[in-house]
Amino acid sequence: MKQKIQQIKEQFNEEISKISDLVKLAELEIRYLGRKAGELTQILRGLKTVPADQKKEIGQLANQLKQEMVEKIETAKKVIKGQAISSDWLDVTLPGVQWPQGHLHLVTQAISEITEIFEHVGFVRRRYPEVEWDFYAFESLNMPPDHPARDEWETFFIDPKPVGPKGQRVLTPHTSSGQVREMERKHLPIRMINISKCYRRQIDVSHAPMFHQFEGLLIDKDVTIAHLKGTLDYFAKQFFGPDRKARIRPFHFQFTEPSFEVDVSCGLCGGKGCKMCKAGWLELGGAGMVHPNVLKAGGIDPKKYSGFAFGWGVERTYMMKAGLSIPDIRMLYQSDLRFLNQF
Ligand code: PHE
């Protein structure tokens, strides 16, 4: 019996020294200490049959070995687990965990691109309030109270009645509200690109109640329509591509004289005319030479200075980029990753 115990001990020591994973270790534990058929368990169970004079000694030996085995198994477990952790930490050649990476929202991307294009030719980025006085949104823009032209701006009013010398507060319906604000800074000449949120009571595939506009304003001496046309053409080429052109058509705004609608040549048909465009052209937005009354409202002498302004929607412009298929402006604001991840 003594010999048997010694044999089991040696065999166990040899086997455990070779084990380096937890599964094998668990198998070893069962083999020696398993409740039903563990080799040492059987010895312990057989103690009853040992002659009385040897019982004490053998009993001690067997129990001591059990104790040793339990301790060795515990130590081995710790070593194996420790190795797993340290090899994880130390193996710098393992590929890292790749976190999914997002990107800027499409509108943010468009705003950065537009800003950069105009900064290249000396315009300074501005952002004027979303909650605006009637004065800046309408009155200073040559639209006195009750003027019917205001209707086109489908405005959200905050105050039901004027609350001060600048009238009611509104959610600004266009970035033109930044024109007189910029003039009031009294830094001439002006080259501003105001990109801000605008609000109108409208919703369909091409209109959202909240959207962004960008507004260019240039005020200097001897500014002509040719400067406006050149700037618009520059933008069309930079933003849409070198083959694109801008054109201006006569229109009417209260705050510009003369006023124009701006079109860009169609990228799909190259200006020949197709079902995406109107005879080769796509409508962008409004523009014109700043009205003398607007200059006066901003404290600038229209006899000395002149300027041009243009403005339209960021979302719409972005949607018109060749190759993009965004059929509904509202998709830009639904945060649907299946859509956003395509860009
Ligand atoms: N603010 C006008 C609009 O929202 C566009 C415009 C800007 C027209 C500047 C002329 C000059 O429709």
Image (cartoon, rainbow, N blue to C red):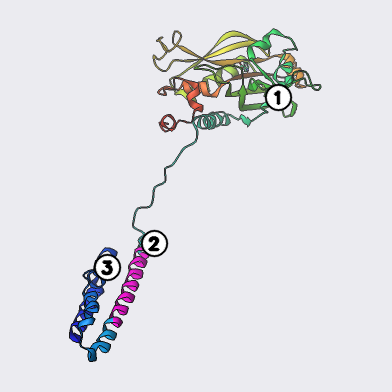
Q: CA distance from mark 2 to mark 1?
A: 57 Å
Q: Does the magenta-highlighted stretch encompass residue 334?
A: no
For the residue carrying disc 1, how many other residues have a C-alpha within 10 Å: few (<14), some (14-19), or many (20+)? many
Q: Would you say the beta carbon of the disc 1 residue lies within 8 angstroms of ligand 1?
A: no
Q: Which residues are magenta?
A: 63-86
In front: mark 3 or mark 2?
3
For the residue carrying disc 3, how many other residues have a C-alpha within 10 Å: few (<14), some (14-19), or many (20+)? many
Residue nearest the viewer, comparing 212 with 81: 81
Mark sitting earlier along the chain (2/1): 2
Q: In the figure, is residue 33 to the left or right of 132?
A: left
For the residue carrying disc 2, how many other residues have a C-alpha within 10 Å: few (<14), some (14-19), or many (20+)? few
Q: Secondary structure at mark 2?
A: helix
Mark sitting earlier along the chain (3/2): 3
**Residue 36 image position (x, y, % from top left):** 23, 68
Q: Amino acid at mark 3?
A: Leu
**Residue 47 image position (x, y, % from top left):** 23, 81
Give the quadrant of ligand 1: top right
Mark sitting earlier along the chain (3/1): 3
- Residue at the spot of label 2: 89
Indicate whether 340 appears above or below 258.
below
Give the number of the disc on residue 132: 1
Q: In the figure, is residue 115 to the left or right of 290?
A: left
- Residue at the spot of label 3: 25
